[in-house]
């Protein structure tokens, strides 16, 4: 039997989820809605009762030609004549289950770590249930919460160990609001999940048939934020240092649209830069709103703009606001820029990075060397405070790290510094623009995030080109400001910089520059 693991239903018999309804009827509706495989999971019923339920469920699944498995109980699977079992780490061992049930039985194993996954795959499991993805009341005793990033790690390690053939689903807290994103984020560049496993999202639903159909259709479509458009080609030799005139090689369309449509640029940022960030957004043509209130994020996200999450002054309450906003923008495909300020500096910040990156999809991550290292999970990345500190990496190392991170996260990553490194996992550019005064004023990194988010709001999925245009506009404006005769230092630089940002935009728009390909 060729098994389809896309929508894997695991049953539950607790009152909280069944609410007095009949399990067999619920499963029947779920199967009609498109569930592709069912597991009977019941930790409390007596053996005879289990066999009775298994037989009743098997009638339902057979009628739709999909498999039924039993959790843990090989004896029940044999007695009811179903298609296989699912075994946890504390259940009967895989080899014994295989010996009893035979080679044609479907046997799945729960795996929580790379080690468990490898052992089960080597031992001949047909599929693995990877989790727990998110904490869930359905299973209170989970060993560890691994998030989509943990699942992705296991998938790539399976591939690396030549065990890529084993099928995989993920489980734990998966529902209609996150299934699509989790599948997208958990996919490693070399191996994707074959499906999702759910309990409460279907068994606990008011209408199990509709819940199943909705989950299935979201699984089979792309998430709203993955609307990557063909990026325009960019032909430049590395390393790059752009002159103002070179901006004509980039799409002035972004700046033009930015100024014509004035999209919302929603900033959840630290207290230090609120005013400066709002001014910068205005100068490049966006409409800034500085709101840290997660409760209003869904309304703001619907206005079609972008979001910056800058965790410069993160608190536990702030973090839950960020998460709420991140999900609201993900739901409508609104671009999100994440600035993991001081990411490695404290335990709170490391946790905030983990929570946000597992809790939603981020279109562009921007940070200095230490921050990007922390985000990438490079061991030993230690930071003093939030400033960048001296570099320990060559440009080549940086490019490799940034490119790998972008590929892993399926997004765009910017590592700022004297030379900025930008990658979408395919193309990686080193940008040699900017001015030292940017390092002498507060919030220059934060407001670059605001500028990038402003451009992303009109990027129509061309994240890389829009980000590159934003960075160059910002840095060339800084160069021009610093060259002004009236600019004597960081103090006079700030107003001149705002002027130049605004002038860049105006000039680009009036010249109506178009994208020009430099053919070699
Ligand atoms: N196994 P819900 S989590 C049965 O981590 C089960 O192995 C898990 O329930 C694991 O879809 C889980 O309602 C419960 O969150 C999943
Ligand atoms: Mg078990």
Image (cartoon, rainbow, N blue to C red):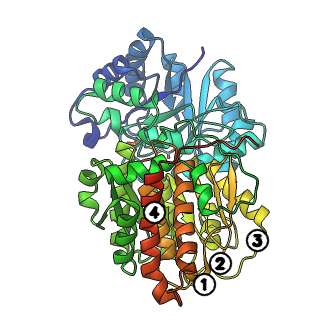
Disc 2 to disc 1, how far (Cα)?
7 Å
For this rendering, which residue is in front, 64 or 427? 427
Which quadrant is the C terminus positioned in?
top right
Residue placed under numbered mark 3 in the picture = 393
Residue at 47% in and 63% down:
504
Can you tell me whether the CB of the residue at mark 2 lies under 8 Å from the nearest atom of ligand 1? no
Disc 3 to disc 2, how far (Cα)?
14 Å
**Residue 453: percent from left, percent from top:** 44, 58
Which quadrant is the N terminus positioned in?
top right
Is there CB contact under 8 Å for labels 2 and 1?
yes
Residue placed under numbered mark 1 in the picture = 384
Residue placed under numbered mark 2 in the picture = 382
The residue mark sitting in front, 4 or 1, is 4
Disc 4 to disc 1, how far (Cα)?
26 Å
Query: Does label 4 or label 2 sit earlier along the sequence?
Result: 2
Disc 4 to disc 3, how far (Cα)?
26 Å
Is there CB contact under 8 Å for labels 3 and 2?
no
Query: Does label 3 or label 2 sit earlier along the sequence?
Result: 2
| Residue 451 numbered mark, or none | 4
Residue at 69% in and 63% down:
241
Query: Does label 4 or label 3 sit earlier along the sequence?
Result: 3
Element marked by disc 4? helix
């Amino acid at each position: 039997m060729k098994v389809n693991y896309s929508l894997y239903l695991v049953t539950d018999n607790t009152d909280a989820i069944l609410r007095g309804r009949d399990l067999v009827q619920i499963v029947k509706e779920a199967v009609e809605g498109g569930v592709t495989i069912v597991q009977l999971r019941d930790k409390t019923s007596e053996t005879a009762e289990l066999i009775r339920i298994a037989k009743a469920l098997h009638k339902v699944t057979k009628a739709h030609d999909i498999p039924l498995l039993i959790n843990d109980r090989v004896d029940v699977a044999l007695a009811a004549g179903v298609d296989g079992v699912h075994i946890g780490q504390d259940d009967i061992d895989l080899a014994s289950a295989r010996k009893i049930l035979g080679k044609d039985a479907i046997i799945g194993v729960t795996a929580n770590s790379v080690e468990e996954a490898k052992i089960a795959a080597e031992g001949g499991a047909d599929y693995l249930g990877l989790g727990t993805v998110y904490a869930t009341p359905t299973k209170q005793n989970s060993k560890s919460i691994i998030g989509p990033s943990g699942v992705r790690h296991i998938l790539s390690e399976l591939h690396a160990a030549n065990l890529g053939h084993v099928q995989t689903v993920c489980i734990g807290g998966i529902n209609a609001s996150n299934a699509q994103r989790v599948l997208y984020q958990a996919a490693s560049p070399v191996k994707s999940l074959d499906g999702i496993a759910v309990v409460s999202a279907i068994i606990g639903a008011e209408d199990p048939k509709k819940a199943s159909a909705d989950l299935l259709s979201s699984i089979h479509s792309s998430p709203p934020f993955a609307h990557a458009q063909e990026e325009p080609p960019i032909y430049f030799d590395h390393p790059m240092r752009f002159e103002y005139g070179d901006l004509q090689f980039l799409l002035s369309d972004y700046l033009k649209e930015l100024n014509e449509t004035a999209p919302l640029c929603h900033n959840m940022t630290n207290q230090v830069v609120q005013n400066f960030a709002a001014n910068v957004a205005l100068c490049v043509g966006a409409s800034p709103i500085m709101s840290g209130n997660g409760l209003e994020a869904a309304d703001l996200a619907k206005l079609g703009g972008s979001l910056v999450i800058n965790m410069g002054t993160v608190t536990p309450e702030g973090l839950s606001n960020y998460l709420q906003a991140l999900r609201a923008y993900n739901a409508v495909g609104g671009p999100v820029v994440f600035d993991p300020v001081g990411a490695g500096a404290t335990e709170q910040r490391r946790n905030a990075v983990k929570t946000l990156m597992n809790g939603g999809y981020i279109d562009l991550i921007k940070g200095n060397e230490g921050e990007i290292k922390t985000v990438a999970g490079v061991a030993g990345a230690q930071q003093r405070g939030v400033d960048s500190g001296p570099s320990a990496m060559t440009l080549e190392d940086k490019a490799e790290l940034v490119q790998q991170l972008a590929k892993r996260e399926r997004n765009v990553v910017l590592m700022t510094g004297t030379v900025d490194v930008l990658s979408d996992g395919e193309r990686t550019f080193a940008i040699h623009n900017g001015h030292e005064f940017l390092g002498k004023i507060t919030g220059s990194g934060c407001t670059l995030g605001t500028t990038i988010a402003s451009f992303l709001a009109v990027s129509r999925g061309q994240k890389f080109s829009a980000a590159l245009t934003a960075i160059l506009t910002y840095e060339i404006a800084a160069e021009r400001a610093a060259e002004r005769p009236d600019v004597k230092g960081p103090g006079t630089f700030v107003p001149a910089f705002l002027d130049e940002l605004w002038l860049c935009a105006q000039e680009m728009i009036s010249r109506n520059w178009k994208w020009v390909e430099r053919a070699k």
